[in-house]
Structure formats: C-alpha cells, structure tokens
Image (cartoon, rainbow, N blue to C red):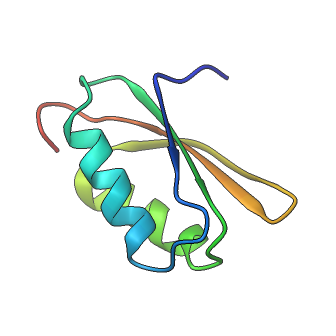
Amino acid sequence: MTWDEDLDATGLLCPLPVLKARKHLMAMAPGAVLLMRADDPAAVVDVPHFCAEAGHTLIEQHSEGAELRFFIRKGGSSA
C-alpha cells in the first residue's frame, strides 16, 4: 500500500494518537492517505471511531508486532 504522509504516534496514549492524526489530516488534500503508526491498544477502537465521525475512510489496519498501522484516506473538504 502507498501513502502520502507518515505519522509516528508510537509511545503516545489516548487521545494523543487521534489528535495528531486529526492535525495531520487537516493539512492534507482530500483523498490523500495517511499512514499512522501507534502502539496504544486503545487505538484499535479510537481510530476507526474517529474516521467514522470525521468523514475519513479507514482503508486498512493491521499490526506488525506491537506496532499498529492505520491507513486513513482523508475525506472531502476539511473534515
């Protein structure tokens, strides 16, 4: 999978990974893809909820060891 921006949110606890993703996505063009890496177990619930509420698409999520990877496609306008 390809992405446009990479956000390393490892070591951060809820809600910081989602807040940092929100900030990154606000600066990105609609349709661009953000790869967010996190290791907070709460992110598996928080990130999909954030995407649904903010109008972004969670394309894929998976884990690589303790690291969680989320591929998020930015929704329209400034969601």
Q: Nearer the viewer, residue 1 or 57?
A: 1
Residue 4 located left or right of residue 60 = left
Which residue is situated farthest in the front direction here? 11
Q: Residue at x 25, y 50 (%)?
A: 23
- What quarter of the picture does the N terminus occupy? top right
Q: Position of residue 32 (x, y in %)?
A: 37, 23
Q: Nearer the viewer, residue 30 or 55?
A: 30
Q: Residue at x 74, y 59 (%)?
A: 67
Q: Position of residue 8 (x, y in %)?
A: 55, 50
Q: Kindly indicate the quadrant of the structure image that contains residue 66.
A: bottom right
Image vertical order of residue 55 relative to residue 20, above or below = above
Which residue is situated farthest in the right direction here? 65
Q: Position of residue 7 (x, y in %)?
A: 49, 45
Q: Residue at x 27, y 35 (%)?
A: 75
Residue 20 located left or right of residue 5 = left
Q: Kindly indicate the quadrant of the structure image that contains residue 5.
A: top left
Residue 12 located left or right of residue 24 = right
Image vertical order of residue 72 relative to residue 43, above or below = above
Image vertical order of residue 49 relative to residue 28, above or below = below
How many tags in the picture?
Answer: 0
- What quarter of the picture does the C terminus occupy? top left
Q: Residue at x 60, y 69 (%)?
A: 44
